[in-house]
Each structure stands twice: as structure tokens, then as C-alpha cells.
Amino acid sequence: MFIVTAKEMYDIDKFAMQEIGLDGKLLMENAGRAVAEKITAMSSKQEKICVLAGAGNNGGDGFVIARTMMDQGYHIHVLQVVPDSKIRGDASFHKRIYENCGGSLSLFDGIDGTEVLDADIIIDAMIGIGVKGELREPLLSLVSLINQQTKKVISVDVPSGLPADEGTVEFSAVEATYTFIIGAPKISAFLNHTSPYYGTWELVSIGLPKKAFQLSTSKSIWNETNVRDCFPGRKPDDHKGTHGKGLVIGGCTEMPGALSMTLKAALRAGAGLITGATSEHVINRIASTNVEATYAVLSTTDGFINNDSKVNVQDYDAIALGMGMGRKAFTSELVRDVVSEANCPIIIDGDGLHHIQPYLTSLKRRKSPTIMTPHPREMAMLLGANVNEILVEPFRYASEFARKFDVYLVLKGMYSIITSPEGKQSVNMTGNPGLAKGGSGDVLTGIILAMIMQRQDMFDAICNACYVHGKSADLLIKHQHSHHDLLASDVIDGIANVYRTIS
Ligand SMILES: NC(=O)C1=CN([C@@H]2O[C@H](COP(=O)(O)OP(=O)(O)OC[C@H]3O[C@@H](n4cnc5c(N)ncnc54)[C@H](OP(=O)(O)O)[C@@H]3O)[C@@H](O)[C@H]2O)[C@@H](O)CC1
Ligand SMILES: [K+]
């Protein structure tokens, strides 16, 4: 499923019309019919439905929805929120058809007399991706009235007033119960501060050609079909070496658990052989619960690993670096040496991100892929930016960072964004608030390690890992646990449930 900006959507629309030859009125008919079908499935003919129609194509969709539902016997009224003179193009065409069919319509004449107050269901087709700046009056007051009601509000494409793109914090918008998104989800459906306005959303397809999307956008949702298409298989003659030999470097006296979880997650996720490189103290603490792993002892100062014992990094297919290692200056040296000496893919996570921050440009010199897995606060630290700036524009920050430092980036969050060094982006939709706990990130790193060692496309492997991690949590919440009691170690055990569903 592709994800678009408003501009990309307009480009796709233009391509479909000018290059492919699809008519705009037909696309609008398809959009309105597809949304009407969804709405009829969730409403009854006894309910009074008010369609709020604007002047642009979003309003045009509203007229098609109204006509389609009216013909099926629904109790429909259109409240046109702009004067007749403003209605243009295809919207004007579909308004005429609605009226020719005998549809009921009135002009919005101020809040007091509004039909919104009478309706059981409000269909918001005032403004879609064409919004510019903050809502003007009288729509601003109308939106505020709608948001005070407890009625079911169904937005068409985008809740009116909400920007389709990232980067805007000042806006007023309809707080929809449901949104039926047309063609492709817009970026604002995946941002912390804008996604709640959509309510529950669903995509409706209107016949826009796949070719148009492929030419215009490099962003998509990574879903179960993607996972099934490229999930590493197992053959009868496989041996432990077939599935990779991984090294995990991290841990300190105060945080032995982080390394332990990465080791265990990597093994559960399918790694062939895993070695933990850490202090003797940490090994003594975790070895009995990670009996399948092997260990390399690193020298320490005050319980933190240092660079004296020189880690052997040459014999591995991939390395994970950083979890629970602390932030001592002498550990930075070790991180730098591993990053410059290893000839295999490296995942840098947790404290490793802090150590590498002053040396980010060195990553460009690596011959093998580098994967970084920051949460938004770590991303802000890496960039020297404010975390709120990142949260408002995560796609842009992620894309610029990945390109600049030639890394694969997993920007973790409610919707994690995976970015390739070329700027290709995927959003992972699995996962739930139960994952907002210590250790979750260490588990994800272990799963990524296992996936990238099985020698498939790096981007696909990382996306699969994010999917598996979130899906494990989702299945556990569905069947056994709650958001409150779910632990990172449960997510490791839950990997088995995910594998059973996809293999
Ligand atoms: N892409 C596709 O393939 C297809 C797209 N389709 C649909 O088209 C939609 C995009 O249509 P669009 O481009 O006509 O813009 P749209 O969202 O109707 O908004 C324009 C109106 O909003 C108004 N307005 C703007 N800002 C405002 C403000 N701050 N405060 C107040 N008013 C403001 C603006 O007024 P103006 O500024 O011009 O006076 C104008 O009247 C898209 O979301 C989808 O639903 C489907 O039909 C099928 C095919
Ligand atoms: K809308």
C-alpha cells in the first residue's frame, strides 16, 4: 500500500488522467461510490445523514456519495458549505447530477440554522488534500461545532482542515470517527499529532493505476503480504551456518538484561549462531538463561567494556552494537573501531548511537550496510534537534539522515519508519502501546540481526523484522496479555506465534 504527500497524489491524479486517459469525473464517481459502499455497511436507513460538501473535488466526492446513498433509500441531505459561485470543475458536474436526480440540498447560512445539529451521521466532504493554511470562517466555527457533537462523523479522504503532509502544527480540523481515504493514505495518517484526527481509517481504491503510484512515490506500508513475499525460508539441507553467524556487543554491570534480550531475540528469530561479546560479569549473569549463545569476554573499567581486549569482528555475517553498554568515553573507542574494522552489516542501537554521534560521517566510509535504530529522542540527539521537530516531520528527517550518512534508519515510534540510504521509506503498522517498555528496542535489534543475516535484501529484512516484532506484541495482546503487563521478554516468546501465522 503506497503512502503519498498531497503533491504526489496530485501527480498520480494527473498521470492517470493525462497519460492513462482516465476521466476526472469517472475517478470522482469511483471515489464517491466506493466510500458510499463503506458507509452503507455501517449505517441504517432510519438514520438522518447530512453530507457537508465543499467547493473542490472533495465536495464533488460528497455529491456522489449523497446520490448513491439516496438511490439506495437512505435519508440524505446535502449542506453545501460554500456559495454556488465557488463550486467548480467535476464537483459542479456531480452537483448538477445530484440535483437532477432530485437530491435535497441547502446552503449553509450560519451555525444557528445548521442541519448538522439534526443529523445522526455527518459526512465530511468539505476539504480534502486541497487545504491551504488554517481554516477560514465560517468553516472554522462549523468544524468546532462538529467536534462538540457526539455524532458519528465520517470524513472523506482527509478530515477537513487537516494537512495531508507533515510539518504543520497549527491547524483546526474535523475529529473524525472514521475516515475513508481515497487512493492512498496521506502522510498525516502516520504522525503522532495528526493521526488521531482520522479516527479509524480505511483505504478505498478508485482505479488509479499502480504505475502512477510507482512513478510518483517511494513510500509505502509494509504489510503481511510484503512479509510473505520475501520471508526467509528453510530448506531440508540447511545447517546452522546457513542462517548466519551474528555478534552482539554491549552490556555493563548495571544493565546485563539488554544484551540478554538481544541475544535471545536473535536466536528465537532464526539466527544460526549468536555470540555475545561483553564483560565477564555480564556473561556470568546471563549465560544460564541464554544457553544457546556463545560468549567472548571483553575487558572492562568500572564494569563498562573498554577497547583493551580488541573484539574480533571478522568472522561474523552481521553485528549488533550498543545495547546496555553505557556511555563511558572509553567505550566510544571500541564502538568506533568496530564500525571501521568490520566488513559486515552493523546495527547500531541504544548507547551505541550516543557513541557514534560525533563520528557520523565515518559511516559513509563503510563498505557494508549500517543500520541505525533510534527512537525519536535518540534521533533528536543524533541531529542536535528538538524531539518535537522530529515528531512533526519524521519522514523528512529520516530521509535526509539516511541519505546523508548512507545508512538504513529505523525511526521507532507508534508507526516506525524504515528508510533506505536511497530514501525509500516503509511504515510498519504492527505493534501497540504494550511495547512502550524498557527492553522493546533490544528485542527489535535482535530480530533485525537475525533477519539481515539470512542474506536477503537489506531493506526487506529490516521491514520484516519490524513487522514480526510488532505482530508478536499484537498477537500477545489479543490472546494472553494486556498493554499493561506485556514485557519485552514476552515479545521474544511470542515470535513463535508470528512465525506460525506466516510460514
Ligand atoms: N486525487 C485524486 O485522484 C482524486 C481526488 N479526489 C478528491 O479530491 C480532493 C482534492 O480536491 P481539490 O484539489 O479540489 O481540493 P479540496 O480538498 O476539495 O479543497 C479545495 C477547497 O478547499 C478550500 N480551502 C482550502 N483551504 C481552505 C481553508 N484554509 N479554509 C477554507 N477553505 C479552504 C478551497 O477554497 P479556496 O481557497 O479555493 O477558496 C477549495 O474550495 C481529494 O482530497 C479527494 O477527496 C476524488 O474526487 C477522486 C480523484
Ligand atoms: K474531508
Image: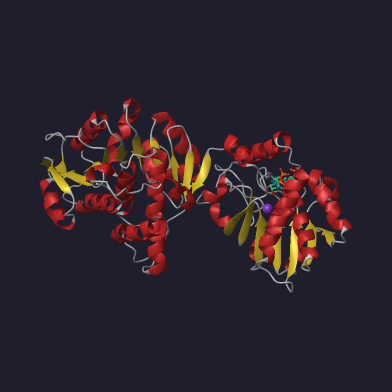
Judge whether residue 189 can be spotted in this image. yes
- Tell me which residue sits at (12%, 34%) in the image: 308
Q: Which of these two is toward me, 274 or 297?
A: 274
Residue 436: x and y, percent?
A: 37, 57
The quadrant of the rendering that contains the C terminus is bottom left
Position of residue 2 relative to residue 484, above or below, is above
Left or right of 228 on screen, residue 151:
right
- Tell me which residue sits at (23%, 46%) in the image: 240
**Residue 117 sits in which quadrant?**
bottom right
Judge whether residue 125 can be spotted in this image. no
Position of residue 141 relative to residue 238, above or below, is below
Residue 420: x and y, percent?
A: 43, 36
Residue 107: x and y, percent?
A: 83, 57
Residue 158: x and y, percent?
A: 64, 51
Position of residue 182 relative to residue 177, above or below, is above
- Tell me which residue sits at (38%, 43%) in the image: 461
Q: Which residue sits furthest front?
A: 237
In this figure, which colouring scheme has been used for the structure?
A: secondary structure
- Tell me which residue sits at (83%, 52%) in the image: 95
Left or right of 470 on screen, residue 286:
left
**Residue 212 sits in which quadrant?**
top right
